[in-house]
Image (cartoon, rainbow, N blue to C red):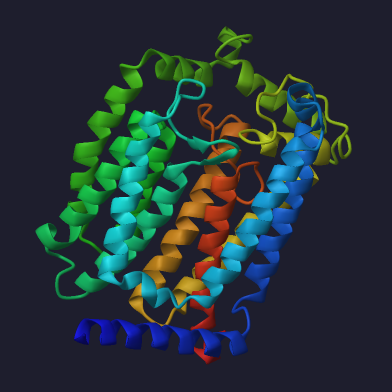
Amino acid sequence: MRSAARALATAWGYIERAQERKRMGIGDKVLFTLAIALVLFGIVMVYSASAVLATERYGTQYHFLARQTVWAMLGLLVMFGAMRVDYHLYQHPRLLALAVIGTLLLLVAVFFFPAVNGAHRWIRWRSFSIQPSELARFTLILFLAAHLDRRIPAGIKRFELTFLPCALVTGAMMGLVALEPDLGMAASLGLLLVVMLSLANVPVRHQAALGVGVLPALAWLIFHVEWRWERILAYLDPWQDPLGTGFQAIQSLIALGSGGITGVGFAQGKQKLFFLPEPHTDFIFAHIGEEWGWVGTSLVLLAFGILLWRGMRIARYAPDTFGMLLGGGIVAAILTQALFHMSVAVGLLPVKGTPLPLISYGGSSLVTTMAEIGVLLNIAQQARPEDV
């Protein structure tokens, strides 16, 4: 009875605080407006990039447009919901345990579903599908923020209390994601761990232990898997095999080069005519470069730069350490994914399928990212009034 009473009192406290935040508004109008603008721009560019492909595969040019619009509407609802939920709720140990265990089970469940392009990354049921690795990123941020907050300041230097639990949970998620296989997402989870350990001022010697354990495994996964090694060779010189391993990188560069300063015009791109693979997902930045040119890609870079500025500002002025860690982790996750996508498009990194947050086609990525932004906006609502 006492436990139920405490739970009821806690829930009522969250409801009261939600009502107070409702009167306070959205928290950061710049971030809110930017997120909506990027989503709307993404819907337009997904249509432009996918119309021909959709007609070829599904008999209608609006297939991907319709699905992305539905996902965007769902993402908007999730973002508004996350804005109204007190972010301190995510510190609750039982909720965190449920989230971590549930995510790990989903990462295991993907292996019981048919592979797509040789990889087990999706849970599919009829027309519905989710990618658990996107959820794993968000869950990991919540877990790391809550765990590190509990260890500050007394136990932050304790290896067995601070670093080891973080490394074990992250390692479990990285291992399952790498087995899908999705080495890029696995590496991004490891990078996220490093960023959040740094934000919490965990001793560098503990972080070095992560490199000792991960780097040899990463090297083995690259050099002992033939197709990954071929991607590295194609990255170094894509013209060695222009119709094979180097095809994607070359077509992406052609798209960007064709755009020039101002682009060839909306819906006038040629690379989407079955030259540039996956122009609506993994290479949408190259498609933007072709149709909108240097001006368009620069504006996209500027948008993510503003997102970085507003997000880190929110983390800086968060009312507590948990809010700072949570906000910093979310910003790091979104920006590293965006930079990875754009770096692949311009040839700075080997080809790897990574969506551009808020813009690329894909429901799991879009909804998860909008949920993360909703949490950021909730943190902003609770910032000190003089810092808003």
- Residue 253, by quadrant, is top right
Image coords of residue 53 (percent x, y): 75, 26
Q: Is residue 28 left or right of residue 102?
A: right
Residue 166 coordinates in the image, percent (x, y): 23, 55
Quadrant in the picture for the C terminus: bottom right
Q: Position of residue 287 (x, y in %)?
A: 74, 34
Q: List the single residue furthest toward the front.
A: 1
In the image, taking residue 18 as reference, residue 304 lies left or right, namely right
Relative to residue 112, is residue 5 depicted above or below?
below
Task: Between residue 338 and residue 53, name the one nearer to us.
Answer: 53
Q: Is residue 48 visible?
A: yes
Q: Quadrant of the N terminus?
A: bottom left
Q: Is residue 305 above or below residue 130?
A: below
Seen in the picture, residue 170 relative to 350 is either above or below; the reply is below
Residue 373 sits in quarter: bottom right
Question: Residue 136 in the image: x percent, y percent?
Answer: 39, 49
239 or 251: nearer the eye? 251
Residue 322 shown left or right of residue 53 in the figure: left
Q: Residue at x 37, y 43 (%)?
A: 106
Can residue 377 be seen in the rendering of this structure? no
Residue at screen point 34% across, 58% down: 99
Q: Residue at the location (79% across, 46% down)?
A: 44
Is residue 96 shown above or below 116? below
Number of labels in the image equals 0
